[in-house]
Amino acid sequence: MLNKTLAGLAKGLQQGEFSSVELAQAYLQRIKNEDSKYNSFITVTEELALQQAAAADASRAAGNAGIMTGLPIAHKDIFCTQGVRTSAGSKMLDNFISPYDATVIRKFNAAGSVTLGKTNMDEFAMGSSNESSFYGPSRNPWNTQHVPGGSSGGSAAAIAAGLAPAATGTDTGGSIRQPAAFCNLTGLKPTYGRVSRYGMIAYASSLDQGGPMAQTAEDAAMMLNVMAGMDPLDSTSVDRAVPDYTSNLNAPLAGLKIGLPKEFFSASLNPDIAALVHAAVKEYEALGATVKEVSLPNTALSVPAYYIVAPAEASSNLSRFDGVRYGYRCKDPTDLEDMYKRTRGEGFGTEVKRRIMVGTYALSEGFYDAYYKKAQQIRRLIQQDFVRVLSEVDVIMGPTTPTPAFRLGEKTSDPVEMYMEDIFTLSLNLAGLPGMSIPCGMSNGLPVGLQVIGNYFAEEKLLNVAHKFQQATDWHTLKPAGL
């Protein structure tokens, strides 16, 4: 049963092939046996999982089970979970036990799902490789000498290693899509405001968005049905009706208009990835789609714009971590200023400090107009590019990442080289658009992802486009050796 998709497990539970408790026990045992290879979990919630599984079995016996009842999932350790350590991958919150549930957690609990644990991540979601975590890097199950991507690398590694059938993630600049590409998964970043950010520890508030990570588009649709919706506790949550994302998965693709941005296929793109993306587009043509070249001329500006806007917001959001109310506090401070300085100096890692410094500088007097304001103006130009192109086509396709998963330590000495890993994903967050990464092939034994971008609140169309591709291909069914 550990090789089944979320939809397959739901069917098995419905047909009585196994109970929720048996399913939870099997995954918990696998985590105990295997996760030392991958370091994908920060906290395993065994007692909670078994309690929830028993409650799910009781609900099913009473005839009250829904589609998610009894299904085990993992949660990125950025979602506050009542009574459970919620660390955001940082020493700063290593001792923080959340007193409440994030809205995403509450919704999954209400749907009857089972929480296996909290997954590893780049510290405060700042990273593209999962190497900035206080708990050490997660490892890619396809090759444990390579990164699983970041910041949701622990969620991706857990699913790829068969330690969880699905997991939540967050995406500020590609942190769902990039690890999904690196680990041969389906990952969806919804439209900004589609999924509540309440209880999701903030990195950059105008960019952060939670979403599902799973083996298939069908599984992602099941999860998004739970996650999406208006939340009065989140002022950026959008009051818009939520469709059943599973209802139109099988709609035909005849007449689908695909745009291929010429800027996504530059000389810096790995030639294997370019070839696999073009092959995937050919598959879509066979399914009835038409293709045209389009242009997103401000794509190259997304990296510098993002790395002003996001650090600026981070410098503000992370000012709350000062040793006063919760989290880490330095030992024996001499006065308040010493406590602030040493708490933040000792509690934050290198990458977080770097981004706080950049963001504070960009917001400082005399530099605001030159940096932050200019970055926001570029952000609007990027958004206008997408609006123009998406008025001509239904979806945009291209690579998720410029390379397959790179080796651990390969890019840690050069932050700019690491930042360039997000060249194809950042622009969506700046524009607030939804996007997916789906498996489309292998390069030297490592997975490659196809990115599919849609218009605002077009998640239903994206999931349909992804599902039909997965019905016609088997890339998403490939597993790492030994699984």
Image (spheres, rainbow, N blue to C red):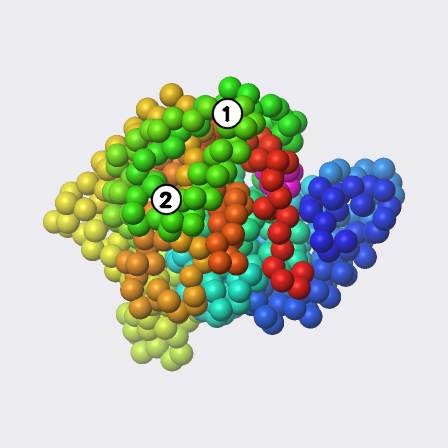
Residue under circle 1?
289
What secondary structure is marked by label 2? loop
Question: Would you call the spot at circle 1 few (<14 residues within 10 Å), some (14-19), or many (20 or more)?
Answer: some
- Tally of numbered discs: 2
The single residue placed furthest to the left in the displayed view is: 366
Q: Nearer the viewer, residue 139 or 25?
A: 139
Q: Nearer the viewer, residue 483 or 236?
A: 483
Residue under circle 2?
424
Q: Is residue 472 visible?
A: yes
Lower sequence index among marks 1 and 2: 1
Query: Height in image: 411 above or below 432?
Result: below
Magenta segment's dominant SS is helix
Residue 97 figure quarter: bottom right
User: Is 154 one of the magenta-colored residues?
Assistant: no
Q: Quadrant of the C terminus?
A: bottom right
**Front tag of 1 and 2:** 1
What secondary structure is marked by label 1? loop
Question: Would you call the spot at circle 2 few (<14 residues within 10 Å), some (14-19), or many (20 or more)?
Answer: many
Residue 244 figure quarter: top right
Q: Amino acid at mark 1?
A: Ala
Q: Tell me the residue at 31%/78% (across/down).
A: 334
Q: Is residue 301 left or right of residue 476?
A: left
Q: Is residue 209 visible?
A: no
Q: Tell me the residue at 55%/31% (across/down).
A: 465
Highlighted magenta segment, given as a residue range: 216-224
Q: Where's residue 191, x and y in %? A: 46, 34
Q: Where's residue 119, x and y in %? A: 56, 59
Q: Tell me the residue at 46%/24% (across/down).
A: 290
Q: Tell me the residue at 19%/40% (across/down).
A: 374
Residue 177: assigned label: none
